[in-house]
Amino acid sequence: MHEDTSFAIHPGMGQQSGAVVYRDIGREMEHQKVNDIYLFTCENGRVAIQFYTDSIVRIVMNPDGEPELDRSQTVVAEPDNIIVKEDFSADTYSLKTSKIELKIDREPFRVSVNDLEGNELVSEGERGMAYRENGEVIVYKQMYKKDHFYGFGEKAGFLDKRGEVNEMWNTDVYAPHNPETDPLYQSIPYFMTLRQGKAHGVYFDNTFRTSFDMRSNADRYSFHAEGGQLDYYVMAGPKPKQVLEQYTHLTGRMPLPPKWAIGYHQSRYSYQTEEEVREIAQNFIDRDIPIDVLHLDIHYMNGYRVFTFDNERFPDPEQLIKDLRGMGIRAVPIVDPGVKKDPEYPVYQEGVRQNLFCKYLEGNIYFGDVWPGTSAFPDFTDEKVRNWWGRKHAFYTDMGIEGIWNDMNEPAVFNETKTMDVEVMHSNDGNPATHRELHNVYGMLMGKATYEGLKEQLDGKRPFLLTRAGFAGVQRYAAVWTGDNRSFWEHLQMSLPMVMNLGLSGVPFTGPDVGGFAHHTNAELLVRWTQVGAFTPFFRNHSVIGSLYQEPWQFGELYEAIMKKYIQMRYRWLPHIYSLFAQASKEGLPVMRPLFMEFPEDEKTYNLNDQFMIGDNVIIAPILAPSVEDRAVYLPDGEWVDYRTGDVYQGRNTYLIHAELEDMPIFIKRGTAVMQADWVSNQDKTWKSITMDIYAGEQGESYRFSYYDDDGETFAYQQGRFLAMEIEVASKADAVYLDIGSQSGDYTPAYRQIDVNLIGLKQGQDVIIKGVKSNGDHKLSFSEW
């Protein structure tokens, strides 16, 4: 293997003798409308255009036959009944909804999508849709100087992907993740373009290996697939939030996770015995460090056989799970797809006898080497297999387990290609296709099988699923962590844009391994990473076998105290964060956001990689380098209050902020509010009291937000068992006004009122709650609701 040496850049290595030639689709020859689908026959292919909403249009090109409109693995939305104004009277056709207009040139066939003001969103110029005889498809789009590109799922490097080529091919990457490391574990062939304050999105619904080239030409970009159709959706925005709402309308939204899943998780590869797990758990209890989950990596199993426990290492797993629950801790075991080839192993026996494993066309089972040795792999593209796999999880749920961790599901195989032979043939629910076509959805379909199996077995409780691999739509089933990072400061830095771009790709529940997985962490890095983790949607500390242990107490009392402070801060902020998760489940918006999502007109936010927002009014500006206690912080429009000191900063300015090791800069926008709870103990995490911290303004600021709560554990919220309030805060020179707008749901929480805490209230400034002047004891009681 020469790929890790200078031989990789030997002259001639990977060099092509000439340019790759694609056949253009050519001129349009005829068109027709069938139901709500516009069909165009061109010289070298056929095109279908279909409107899904007034703001979303689908464009499909098939060079070999009729466009297939019913083969999507990911789109869950059905087309709405859209009124379209048609004009086929000239050489340029027009199809117009109430939000967008398609202009179609006949010769050569070119499609432009514009807003109703005539501004181009995506347009084809000299080049458009094309293909090669080997089955590859491609389309070219105009690129403008002011274009910035985001999303693409899980990608290393900076936030803005202009100047990059992004490949979609789920890959197990243990080697260090560098800015150029691509692809990684998740493939989400979707991106958002931000151009002069307005945004639009493109989703390329193709499961083959695909690539997005935003580098090779200054005035155009392209996206390409090794096979299948050219099948893509344009979402018109025009705001970044609207693009996310439109994209997740197509691919689905995250179900509400249980509250315990958004708490603190502790993991290691591996806690190798029941005794060690109990010791770790007891340390958290004795030290009063909040924790909700302990993860069990592969050593809990008998010879790495899934759906087993090692009877020597874990002699009584059911009692262990029960005892941990009594401590307020859930256990989440890892489950990989590889099933050990062992004729005495019941899971393998079932898979062979019931024809459940991936096979070649000729009928022989595909075997690959993973942790258990030679292994077979369930064919998750087949509903029968997914149902079987889901039922197998009763092994865990019967013990009281409510969450599962899927790893190695790219699928990873220990060979030169790192994955399954692409010639393997999948059943694909009656439409057989090769692994070359379905590789990228294997992990997501495993997640679907797992999540739906857990949901069926948990008697109304919400499952938690964590996955390494996924595709567009993975948010419907699982949270995502960013894989095998390392204990490098550079990896802490890189984790922020990675998580933000995953959020921009429709996956709100994400986070890196806090402290770094591989290599050895150190006290300062672990503290700074824990501070960040307290505000990432998924918060887990995880480390590799052979490395230093990195539980919060491993580096002494000084560092333990700081980490305890920030882990407890996570739990104090849970009412605020949980409300954002509820918003994500309803609207598809991320919990952790880049600043441009809230300030799309501010160019300084377009590639801001070392700050992020929680919701729409909180900026986190962590320290991301060793021995640093001062950092530049950019604050956008508005006035911003330092969470630690109460100091007020004017927006649209950059400030040098001091933050010693125990501090992380957090800024709350003046005139807004955040919701907080009290930390009680690991055994009792029920919110006993809720505080609304209002950061008083005085210049006419008006702020609306949604507060949400429910039992945090069941699906009863889907039947109306929730509490949702629209709250408005208005700050004027004479008073701060607090009003409750619409209220819905019939859930009654343990707390009977919300305490209102005014921060930065000026002398002589009154507090008016629901039209009544407060006399200093600021509360919202249930009777007032």
Image (spheres, rainbow, N blue to C red):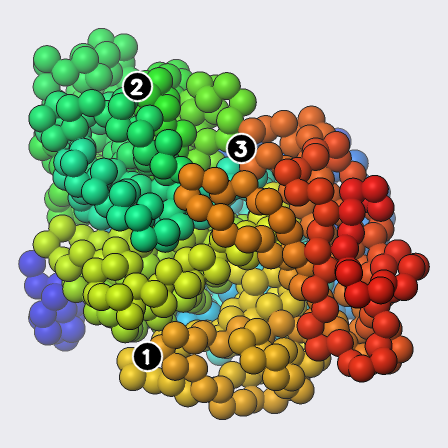
Mark 3–mark 2 Cα distance, whole angstroms, equals 21 Å
Q: Amino acid at mark 1?
A: Ala
Nearest the eye: 138 or 357: 357
**Residue that appears at 31% across and 29% down:** 323
Q: Amino acid at mark 2?
A: Phe
Q: Quadrant of the N terminus?
A: bottom left
* Crowd rating for badge 3 (residues with CA inside 10 Å; few <14, some 14–19, many 20+): some
Q: Is residue 422 above or below residue 483?
A: above
Mark 2–mark 1 Cα distance, whole angstroms, equals 44 Å
Q: Amino acid at mark 3?
A: Glu
Residue lying farthest top?
353
Q: What residue did someone put label 1 on?
A: 625
User: Which of the 4 quarters of the picture holds residue 398?
Assistant: top left
Instruction: Report helix, strand or loop for mark 1.
Output: loop
State which tag comes first along the sequence, 3 or 2. Answer: 2
Q: Name the side, left or right, on which 372 lies relative to 250.
A: left
Nearest the eye: 747 or 387: 747
Residue lying farthest right?
771
Q: Name the side, left or right, on which 691 lies relative to 421.
A: right
The x and y percentages for residue 601 are 68, 77
Q: What residue did someone put label 2 on?
A: 395
* Crowd rating for badge 1 (residues with CA inside 10 Å; few <14, some 14–19, many 20+): some
Nearest the eye: 97 or 329: 329
Q: Is residue 464 above or below residue 623?
A: above
Instruction: Report helix, strand or loop for mark 3.
Output: loop
State which tag comes first along the sequence, 2 or 1. Answer: 2
Q: What residue did someone put label 3 on?
A: 713
The x and y percentages for residue 729 are 80, 64
Labels 3, 1: front one? 3
